[in-house]
Image: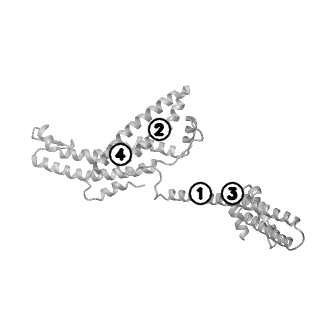
Amino acid sequence: MRSRDLWQALSARRYLLSAWPWRATAYLVTGAVAGAATLVGLAVALVVGGVLTVVLVGLPLLVLTALAGIPLARLERQRLRLIDRAPAPARPVRQPPATGPWPWLITRLRERATWRELGHALLFALVLWPLDALAVALALGVPLHLAGTPLVMATAGGGEEAKVLKQWTVTTWPAASGVAALGLLLLALGGYALGLAAGVRAELARVLVGAPGEGDPEARVGELTRSRARLVDAFEAERRRIERDLHDGAQQRLVALTMALGLARLDAPPGPLADQLAKAHGEAGRALEELRELIHGIHPKVLADYGLPAAVADAADRSAVPVDVALELPGRLPRAVEAAAYFVVCEA
């Protein structure tokens, strides 16, 4: 989430000799220009939309104004590359259920990211860009004006006097040189001040228009929740695949084998061969019963067809220990929850 490149550069000794003060200045200057343009655009759109609302033409314009934060947020994420070389990804949004402008519009108006970006646009137009301009003026404009005092004295003042910030008058060259030296010192300090202002400004922009970073607790909790849901779904799908393969494959083969042994037993004359066929027929039947129990344990069909109460009642009927069942549910639970509850009850 943080603009790591700028913060690391600020702690380096050669910060003032690097390109980072210029990058921070460019970020703040472009922010001031873009913010002023955004203020004018939003004001014009609101005024025109409000006037045309009387004839219902302004309503679509007002709706589109609510989406003004989307392109501005995209521009802000591109400007953040001046502060941090790592890209600032956008917050994830849902895909429209169908193609076309109307499904897209409905989907975007229901997204929290859209209104977060609109809030950023309003904050940018009303508060942030004047602060950007003020930071550049104080950290860059004032020191440059002080540093240019000897030049002003030599040109505009005829070598006799010069106005400093339109407040003080300098009449001697040593005083003008001292003011210039102070300006150079403040210019060096202003380079750090611009870096700090740009860094704080970038952090706020990332919070409003960027996706949560890896260190964000909310993002980590959301990702853990989604990964857990994916694992549960994958486990449930794999268990159903195994149950289906056993039911449609091995069980059907055992049924066919049992029927074949039964027919052979009927056709065989009494004797040792008939006894062996009877024994094999019984073993095949027991194997088929065990396989059915295994399939039932993997995912009982009654659970899939009738839900948790019927499956628990069936498990209670098959229990060697007498069990009373009292289970009331308002409706069907999610399949993963039903399966987990069923197996917990069976183990208990």
Amino acid type shown at disc 1: Arg
Please report whichever mark, 3 or 2, sits nearer to the chain's N-terminal start.
2
Apparent side of residue 242 relative to residue 51 in the rendered image (left or right): right
State the residue in front, 128 or 224: 224
Label placed on residue 335: 3
Please report whichever mark, 2 or 1, sits nearer to the chain's N-terminal start.
2
Q: Looking at the image, do the residues carrying marks 4 and 3 touch, with CB atoms under 8 Å apart?
A: no
Please report whichever mark, 1 or 4, sits nearer to the chain's N-terminal start.
4
The residue that disc 1 covers is 230
Q: Secondary structure at mark 1?
A: helix
User: Visible in this render: residue 81?
Assistant: yes
Image-quadrant location for residue 242: bottom right
Apparent side of residue 115 relative to residue 175 in the rendered image (left or right): right
Q: Residues within 10 Å of mark 1 (few under 14, many from 20)?
A: few
Q: Residue 122: x percent and y percent?
A: 45, 41
Amino acid type shown at disc 2: Ala
Task: Report the Cα–Cα distance between label 3 and label 2.
Answer: 42 Å
Image-quadrant location for residue 250: bottom right
Of discs 4 and 2, which sits in the foreground? 2
* Residue that protrudes farthest toward the top in the picture: 55
Task: Report the Cα–Cα distance between label 4 and label 3.
Answer: 54 Å
Task: Report the Cα–Cα distance between label 1 and label 4.
Answer: 45 Å
Q: Looking at the image, do the residues carrying marks 2 and 1 touch, with CB atoms under 8 Å apart?
A: no
Q: Secondary structure at mark 2?
A: loop
The residue that disc 4 covers is 131
Please report whichever mark, 4 or 3, sits nearer to the chain's N-terminal start.
4
Of discs 1 and 4, which sits in the foreground? 1
Apparent side of residue 117 relative to residue 344 in the rendered image (left or right): left
User: Visible in this render: residue 169?
Assistant: no
Of discs 3 and 2, which sits in the foreground? 3
Task: Report the Cα–Cα distance between label 3 and label 1.
Answer: 14 Å
